[in-house]
Amino acid sequence: MEFHPLNEKDIKRLKSMVSPDRSSTGASNLDLHSRDMSRHPACRPEVVIWPVNRREVSQILGYANQNTIPVTAWGAGTSLEGNPIPLRRGIVLNFSRMNQILDIREADFQADVEPGVIYQDLNHKLRHSGLFFPPDPGTQATVGGMIANNASGTRTVCYGSTKNHVLRLVVVLADGEVVEIGNRAPKTSSGYDLVHLFVGSEGMLGLVVEATVRLAGIAEEFASAVGTFPSVQSAGKAVFEIMRSGVDPAALELLAQECIDLINREQDMGLNVLPTLFMEFHGPTQRQLSDILEIVHEICLQKGCQEFRPGLDRAERDRLLKARYGLGEMIRRNHPDQSRIVIDVAVPVSAYPEMIVFAIEEARKVKTATAYTFGHAGDGNIHLVIGAKEGGPEWAEIDEANNRIVTKALAMGGTATGEHGVGIGKTKFMTLEHGKSLEWMKKVKFLFDPKGILNPGKMFP
Ligand SMILES: Cc1cc2nc3c(=O)[nH]c(=O)nc-3n(C[C@H](O)[C@H](O)[C@H](O)COP(=O)(O)OP(=O)(O)OC[C@H]3O[C@@H](n4cnc5c(N)ncnc54)[C@H](O)[C@@H]3O)c2cc1C
């Protein structure tokens, strides 16, 4: 699709649709919306608009569609694959001012929110209710961005990813039509599941202006433990056995030794520098949890666990989780001159030990690169962050390693992206991953957005 640069009339017309303080063509605002947290090159939009209600979103989209102007939604810009980068320029709609928690229905375990709500703010508001919104990417992400990327996190192994927590959406389609999809029933078998078509669609089918999200009860008690292992493979095997035993972890994270070393250096944690599993379990009583920890301890010992430390208190658990969440930033800080490819493959959990060993070996082949391996192991999700100077000779090697790792994951029945979405970086794997069904995705895209104005340049190779 040919998109033409916005002319003065377009800018004037678009600016007239919102109050004067809520649009900008200023260089710093354009720059702020030109890149996310990934390595992908920046691309400036032509105008940034901060809508405050669905009527404004509808009016802007109606105009953009009529005049074939690209529109890219923006949550908090924390994506790792270039998902909100306005590749074809045009309009960026920043949803940060649509950030109202509209209703919390404790008795139904539900909340209605606007898309710009930061999920931690929702959880803060819920803190005295005994409820929480479980998907947790760990960044200052918005609910709209989480829905669009189908984000997940450390708790997903037990509570599910964002898609498991969206019941109803109000979306504005490419031509400005406002549609309500889904309902507030805990379950439904009525009609095609349009809600889940929009979850993970990266702002390419329509823009979310309201969501009803499902909340979960906070467990009465928790128990956490760390186990260290002689190799990543033995830790991976323990993951598989823990999942098979049916103990239902609330978090099951793997960190390879270089991550532990980094955390120790940055946060003075004093952990053993070995492949490590961080585990958490939720339940009604401590007695039940201590039985679970015994089972898990036994499994870990069988897989060669060298030290098993149960009974972390809340402060210690929180410190560990914070360090785990902070890894991305620590890596960035420690290698300021590098660019990074963030591998995000997920495989069936039985394939996890083989996959993680393969991934590490591939990364090691690139001699001068740095590599950090960690992941939401209970979901079969591996993050391998490989860094080097972009454009240098090792960059092509890193890219080759990335290709081999993703190809292997796909051959094992896995996916190129467990949680970060396709954005720019994973488009090259879409044909291999989806085969003929990619053509059906394109038809769906055409049905909802025939002019291709919504987040153009993404997802499809
Ligand atoms: C250090 C670090 C760690 C991370 N860890 C995780 C992790 O553990 N798990 C995980 O899943 N992710 C993780 N991420 C990635 C990122 O935080 C998530 O993908 C998050 O959901 C992005 O939300 P956002 O609000 O920043 O959205 P943005 O990045 O602004 O946008 C994401 C996508 O959503 C679209 N979008 C935004 N708002 C709307 C809307 N209202 N309607 C339709 N489309 C919309 C955008 O166009 C874009 O395609 C991590 C990122 C960083 C930097």
Image (cartoon, grey):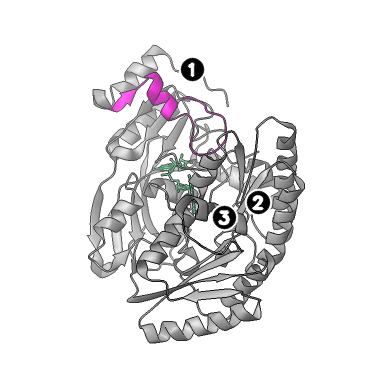
Give the residue type that dot 1 points to: Pro
Q: Amino acid at mark 3?
A: Asp
CA gap, disc 2 and disc 1:
33 Å
CA gap, disc 1 and disc 3: 49 Å
Which quadrant of the figure contains the N terminus?
Answer: top right
Q: Would you say residue 32 sits in the magenta stretch?
A: yes
Mark 2 vs mark 3, foreground winner is 3
Residue 47 higher or lower than 203, as above or below: above
Return the disc, 2 or 1, that comes first in the chain's sequence.
1
Kind of residue sitting beneath label 2: Ser
Which residue is the site of mark 1?
A: 5
Residue designated by label 3: 261
- Where disc 3 sits, the SS reads helix
| 102 relative position to 256: left or right | left
Pointer 3 local density, CA inside 10 Å: few below 14, some 14–19, many at least 20:
some
Q: Is residue 230 left or right of residue 454?
A: right
- The residue mark sitting in front, 2 or 1, is 1
The quadrant in which residue 391 appears is top right
For residue 382, say whether it is visible. Answer: no
Rendered image: mark on residue 437: 2
Q: Considering only vertical position in the picture, is 11 above or below 400?
A: above
Query: Separation of disc 2 and disc 3 at Cα?
Result: 43 Å
